[in-house]
């Protein structure tokens, strides 16, 4: 995937956006979060705050779910907006380069304090890798996170270790 793969933000927003690596890197210092391994030793890289992206896009009042799409592997997760709006992060950079594919790049969602898989709406499964679209919806949007242990095990087998 090229360094300039874009992240689209659309759905119930006033200003749909498309941001590439340069645009993310150029966001204000307030929007930037260096070294996410501080929150989760299993993840690495630098991020921008979801709240900063949503501020640019202007979420419409009726939007109450955030749906993360990864078209690369057709994975989708939809979570209540209020629970992730202030703490959600988009990891986009590692060592001054776009986040590599093996880390879930070029863009990976991270909720710093997620629950164990399948214990809550905000679980590790919602830490979507290869995110290329964030859609604001009214009510739950597309979500194909695994429902049970077997589906989960199968997904992880397809994904390889990690
Ligand atoms: N695009 C995409 N993101 C994904 C997944 C996936 O299959 N595709 N799996 C999810 C699940 S079920 C989990 S538990 C975590 C695993 O992250 P890891 O592979 O970095 O440990 O990624 C989540 N993000
Ligand atoms: Mo998961």
Image (spheres, rainbow, N blue to C red):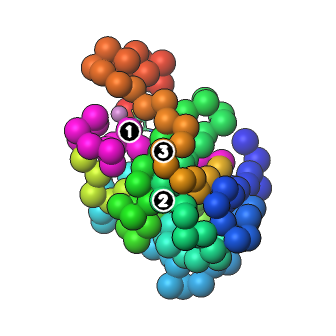
Whether the residue carrying mark 1 lies under 8 Å from ligand 2 is answered with yes
Image quarter for residue 120? top left
Q: Which residue is mark 1?
A: 125
Label placed on residue 64:
2
Q: Is residue 151 above or below residue 87?
A: above
Give the residue displayed 66% in from the left and 36% down from the top.
Answer: 71
Between the residue at mark 3 and the residue at mark 1, the CA separation in whole angstroms equals 16 Å
The residue that label 3 is drawn on is 140
The quadrant of the image that shows the N terminus is top right
Most common secondary structure along the magenta stretch: loop
Q: Which residues are magenta?
A: 116-132
Q: Is residue 44 left or right of residue 22?
A: left
Spatial distance from mark 2 to mark 3, Cα to Cα? 8 Å
Tag 3: Cα neighbours inside 10 Å, few (<14), some, or many (≥20)? some
**Label 2 or label 3, whichever comes before in sequence order:** 2
**In magenta stretch: residue 121:** yes
Residue closer to the observer: 123 or 138: 138
Tag 1: Cα neighbours inside 10 Å, few (<14), some, or many (≥20)?
Answer: many
Secondary structure under tag 1 reads: helix
Secondary-structure class at tag 2: loop
């Amino acid at each position: 995937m090229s360094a300039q793969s874009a992240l689209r933000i659309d759905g119930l927003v006033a200003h749909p956006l498309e941001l590439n690596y340069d645009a993310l890197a150029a966001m204000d210092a307030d929007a930037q979060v260096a070294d996410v391994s501080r929150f989760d030793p299993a993840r690495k890289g630098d991020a921008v705050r979801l709240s900063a992206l949503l501020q640019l896009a202007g979420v419409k009042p009726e939007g109450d779910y955030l749906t993360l799409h990864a078209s690369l592997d057709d994975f989708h997760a939809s979570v209540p907006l209020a629970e992730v709006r202030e703490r959600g992060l988009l990891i986009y950079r590692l060592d001054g380069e776009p986040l590599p594919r093996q880390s879930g790049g070029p863009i990976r969602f991270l909720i710093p304090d997620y629950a164990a898989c399948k214990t809550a709406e905000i679980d590790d499964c919602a830490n979507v890798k290869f995110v290329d679209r964030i859609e604001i919806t009214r009510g739950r949007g597309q979500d194909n996170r695994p429902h049970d242990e077997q589906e989960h095990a199968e997904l992880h087998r397809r994904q390889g270790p990690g």
